[in-house]
Image (spheres, rainbow, N blue to C red):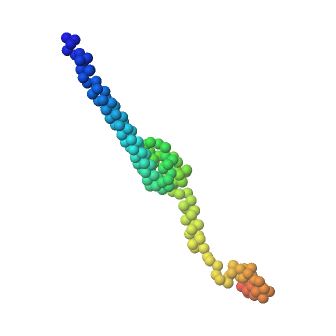
Amino acid sequence: MNDQFDDDEFEDEDESNGSNLVKDLRRQLKAQKKANDEALAELRTFRAEQRKTNVASLIEKAGGNPAYAQFYASEDASESAVQSWIEANSALLQIQPKDEPDPQADQIQKVTFAAANAPTPKLGGQVDLGQQLAAARTREELDAATAAIFSSVPR
């Protein structure tokens, strides 16, 4: 019964072929591992770029500079995770949350309205006469500017 599985008789015949087969399989295994590592590295690069692009678009959608995406450290690039990060760092990112109005917007609107509706000095008014007085170079120009000022003052 022991003679039935005696491998010694086949070793002599396949020794040269068997070692080449093992070498060939090892070479193929090494090449496959290298290809797998390259594919995995490419996949990681692709995922990192996709994550960065997604985060940048969400920051831009919120009203911020998309370049701030480089500061997002979490691996979770879902919309809710990025939105909570934006809300937590809105002061640093200079992003005003959508639900809160800008505290200076009312003041800016008032100043703009006041500047647009402010009275403008008419030519020949006090401002213009003061400029004439300041620009006078000769005694005659100074006398003319002074006379114009005194003639414009109501009595």
Dividing the picture into quarters, in which one does residue 4 lie?
Answer: top left
Q: Is residue 38 left or right of residue 139?
A: left
Q: Position of residue 33 (x, y in %)?
A: 36, 36
Q: In this view, does 120 lie above or below 6?
A: below
Q: Position of residue 40 (x, y in %)?
A: 38, 40
Q: Can residue 53 be seen in this view?
A: yes
Dividing the picture into quarters, in which one does residue 153 lie?
Answer: bottom right
Q: In this view, does 16 lie to the left or right of 69?
A: left
Q: Please state the total of marks drawn on the protein image.
A: 0
Of 77 and 17, nearer the camera is: 17
Q: Residue at x 23, y 18 (%)?
A: 9
Give the residue furthest to the top.
Answer: 1
Q: In which quarter of the image is the C terminus?
A: bottom right
Q: In which quarter of the image is the N terminus?
A: top left
Q: Is residue 97 left or right of residue 122?
A: left
Of 135 and 145, nearer the camera is: 135
Q: Can residue 79 be seen in this view?
A: no
Q: Where is residue 50 in the image (x, y as percent from the top left)?
A: 41, 48
Q: Which residue is drawn at 26% across and 20% down?
A: 11
Q: Which residue is drawn at 47% across and 42% down?
A: 74
Q: Is residue 78 above or below residue 130?
A: above
Dividing the picture into quarters, in which one does residue 36 lie?
Answer: top left
Q: Residue at x 43, y 53 (%)?
A: 57
